[in-house]
Image (tube, rainbow, N blue to C red):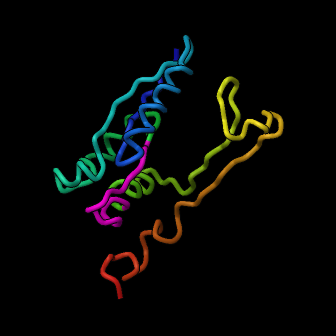
Amino acid sequence: MRRCRIAIIPGDGIGQEVTPEGVRVLDALANDALQFEYERFPWGCQYYLQTGRMMDDDGLETLRRFDAIYFGAVGWPGVPDHVSLWGLRLAICQGFDQYANIRPVRLLPGVESPLRAATRETMDWVVVRENTEGEYAGIGGRNLSARGP
């Protein structure tokens, strides 16, 4: 049996709601050949407000022990966007050299979907979002410093 270790980072806002539902889906997919083992991390803006940091100092090293990272959402009123973005989301993306965010779209048997008019044969989407340009690049000057012109 293969055991897949997943780090769960619900983060903020809707992430707190959707990650438990995603775990329910993974648990429903588990079988005799594949099992999932989860460890939840409290990192995000609430963690920042309590500790002054978005994740533990050894957070990336901790995450390297896992087969996958299930990330919810990041951002909260009262925490500047550049703090939440660079302190967690981009720290993880850049720390793991994720140059692309690839999201295949598939219809699964027995799963209701807004795309239900499509069939498994006609649905063939892959959404690719690059993670290396714009504010994700980590280069530049005042536009990324949160100080303005």
67 w.r.t. 95: above or below? above
Where is residue 141 shown, x and y percent of the image?
Answer: 38, 81
The span picked out in magenta is: 71-85
Q: Is residue 35 left or right of residue 63?
A: right
Q: Residue at x 69, y 37 (%)?
A: 106
77 w.r.t. 109: above or below? below
- Residue closest to the eye, 36 or 22: 22
- Residue closest to the eye, 73 or 142: 73
Q: Is residue 129 left or right of residue 118?
A: left
Q: Residue at x 73, y 46 (%)?
A: 125
Q: Residue at x 36, y 56 (%)?
A: 75
In reply to whether residue 66 is colored magenta, the answer given is: no
Q: Residue furthest top?
A: 32
In reply to whether residue 73 is colored magenta, the answer given is: yes
- Residue closest to the eye, 67 or 40: 40
Where on the picture, by quarter, is residue 52?
bottom left
